């Protein structure tokens, strides 16, 4: 059976899995932004925390996903089997690029600009929201872009914990030695990664002009 | 122009060096046997036993390419000549690779994989090692005791209240869930949750699902206090483990065939379960387990 025949015959299922995949990536990236950006900001205020926090985020990256799922199954609220566990794992993997780029983006703001702001009597909050964040935004968005593109690929592993997504076709294809099935999952995931990369790249460039 | 010609000569010279290196690498490959295994403990253990047996008996160096991504990767690797042999299961080859409709007769399954593998892939099946690693429909021991579960047919009346969690292989295969559900009239409350096979054991032990399909020789079954239900309607085909080897390798190294022959029928179901438990539960080193086993059983 060719790939197109497969899609024609299973269009409903394919769309359902694409929807699950998008929602896994969107919700995990959103949570990672909500957690990661404040942590990145905090690091610019407390430089001593930088090495341990980034080190921890690095360590998270190295935990194999199946091992992480294994740890999460017995835990209440964030564990069990299904979408919650998969999203927790995806958030853990998305944190590093977001935290690091937020820190880098803010730390890269010209000290003279910051001094000028302070000279004008800006509070720390005003300095952050009116000077540092707008100037660092394109670097922060670059981190979100990396996190999103990586998540589209990583979200295929959600199929290992009963959370669905395009990984279902990949796992099924690998299990029954069927290239068509593997491609049926891998191809839309690849297109989705390219689309996310392109869209967030546009956003990144849109905000870059303010920095110059 | 002369400078360009000199560069071209340099490129050609480089190409020859690369070609010679590849040729040497190719020759080196001929002197050693490459043993593969699939990505689970039992396959690694059997790969190691086979590898050590070839080293001991045939005196050939063995390269190990273990933990390859399942039947799919091993089958492609051996047909492409990347590995010389690995241990496969008759029922898996019969249904997953050859895509035959499952039958539960051991002799005819073995005979047809032997015939088809030779004709279609130039691969030879050695004699079975002795055990049958079948799908094991597994439940928690306390549930089995409470509800009087012994056979898979006992499950039919409980299924509407139970949740099942299965690996993708079991859900997809012709000899997997669909046929099982039809044979035993199993109707679960919701469709079985599809997940990674290794995680199904944890999910069962933690009470997140109530029934899973493991492998009958897995060490976790005893370690996690689980019980396997009897396949009383003989649904599953036999899954006898046996080495699969490239015909070309066998022709070039006659000692390898003899070394593998010695392993025929030597590992029983309970023996395999014990070896798996040593690796998975006691976390002993696979090379040590294989060495001990060979020393005791084939001195």
Image (tube, grey):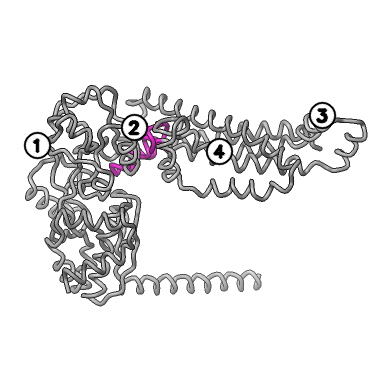
Sooner in the amino-acid sequence: mark 2 or mark 1? 2
- Are discs 2 and 4 both within one chain? no
Examine the structure image and report whether residue A177 is included in the region drawn in magenta: yes
How busy is the neighbourhood of tag 4: few (under 14 within 10 Å), some, or many (20 plus)? many
For disc 3, the chain is A
* Alpha carbon separation for disc pair 3 and 1: 74 Å
Classify mark 4: helix, strand or loop.
helix
Looking at the image, residue A51 sits to the left or right of residue B50; the answer is right
* Alpha carbon separation for disc pair 2 and 4: 31 Å
Q: Nearer the viewer, mark 2 or mark 1?
A: 2
Q: Residue A35: which numbered mark, if any?
A: none
How busy is the neighbourhood of tag 2: few (under 14 within 10 Å), some, or many (20 plus)? some
Looking at the image, residue B43 sits to the left or right of residue A112; the answer is left
Residue B142 falls in which quadrant of the image?
top left
Looking at the image, residue A184 sits to the left or right of residue B74; the answer is right
- Are discs 3 and 1 both within one chain? no
Per the picture, the main secondary structure of the magenta-coloured stretch is: helix
- Magenta residues span A159-186
* Alpha carbon separation for disc pair 3 and 4: 32 Å
């Amino acid at each position: 059976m060719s790939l197109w025949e497969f899609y024609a015959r299973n269009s409903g299922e394919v769309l359902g899995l694409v929807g699950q995949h998008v929602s896994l990536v969107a919700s995990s990236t959103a949570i990672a932004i909500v957690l990661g950006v404040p942590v990145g900001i905090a690091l610019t205020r407390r430089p001593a925390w930088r090495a341990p926090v980034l080190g921890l985020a690095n360590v998270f990256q190295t935990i194999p996903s199946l091992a992480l799922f294994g740890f999460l199954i017995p835990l209440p609220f964030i564990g069990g089997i299904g979408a919650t566990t998969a999203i927790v794992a995806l958030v853990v993997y998305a944190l590093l690029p977001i935290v690091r780029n937020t820190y880098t983006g803010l730390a890269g703001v010209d000290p003279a600009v910051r001094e000028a702001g302070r000279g004008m009597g800006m509070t720390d909050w005003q300095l952050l929201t009116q000077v540092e964040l707008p100037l660092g935004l394109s670097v922060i968005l670059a981190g979100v872009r990396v996190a999103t593109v990586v998540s589209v690929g990583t979200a295929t592993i959600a199929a290992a914990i009963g959370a669905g997504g395009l990984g279902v076709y990949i796992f099924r294809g690998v299990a029954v030695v069927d290239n068509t099935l593997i491609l049926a999952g891998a191809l839309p995931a690849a297109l989705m990664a390219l689309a996310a990369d392109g869209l967030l790249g546009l956003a990144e460039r849109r905000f870059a002009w303010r920095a110059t | 122009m002369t400078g360009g010609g000199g560069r071209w000569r340099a490129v050609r010279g480089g190409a020859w060096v690369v070609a010679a290196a590849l040729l040497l690498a190719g020759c080196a490959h001929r002197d050693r046997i490459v043993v593969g295994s699939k990505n689970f403990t039992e396959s690694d253990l059997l790969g190691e036993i086979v590898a050590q047996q070839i080293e001991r008996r045939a005196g050939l160096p063995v390269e190990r390419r273990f933990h390859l991504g399942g039947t799919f990767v091993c089958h492609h690797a051996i047909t492409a000549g990347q590995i010389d042999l690995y241990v496969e299961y008759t029922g898996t080859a019969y249904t997953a690779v050859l895509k035959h409709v499952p039958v539960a007769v051991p002799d005819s399954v073995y005979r047809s994989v032997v015939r088809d593998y030779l004709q279609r892939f130039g691969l030879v099946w050695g004699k079975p090692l002795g055990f049958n690693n079948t799908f094991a429909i597994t439940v928690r021991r306390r549930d089995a005791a409470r509800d009087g579960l012994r056979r898979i047919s006992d499950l039919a009346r409980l299924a509407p209240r139970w949740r099942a969690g299965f690996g993708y292989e079991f859900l997809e295969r012709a000899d997997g869930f669909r046929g099982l559900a039809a044979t035993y009239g199993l109707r679960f409350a919701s469709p079985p949750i599809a997940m990674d096979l290794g995680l199904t054991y944890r999910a069962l032990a933690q009470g997140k699902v109530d029934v899973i399909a493991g492998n009958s020789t897995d060490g976790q079954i005893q370690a996690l206090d689980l019980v396997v239900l009897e396949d009383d309607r003989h649904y599953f085909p036999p899954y006898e483990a046996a080495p699969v080897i490239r015909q070309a390798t066998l022709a070039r190294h006659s000692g390898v065939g003899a070394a593998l022959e010695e392993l025929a029928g030597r590992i029983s179901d309970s023996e395999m379960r014990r070896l798996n438990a040593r690796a998975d539960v006691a976390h002993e080193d696979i090379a040590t387990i294989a060495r001990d086993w060979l020393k005791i059983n084939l001195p």
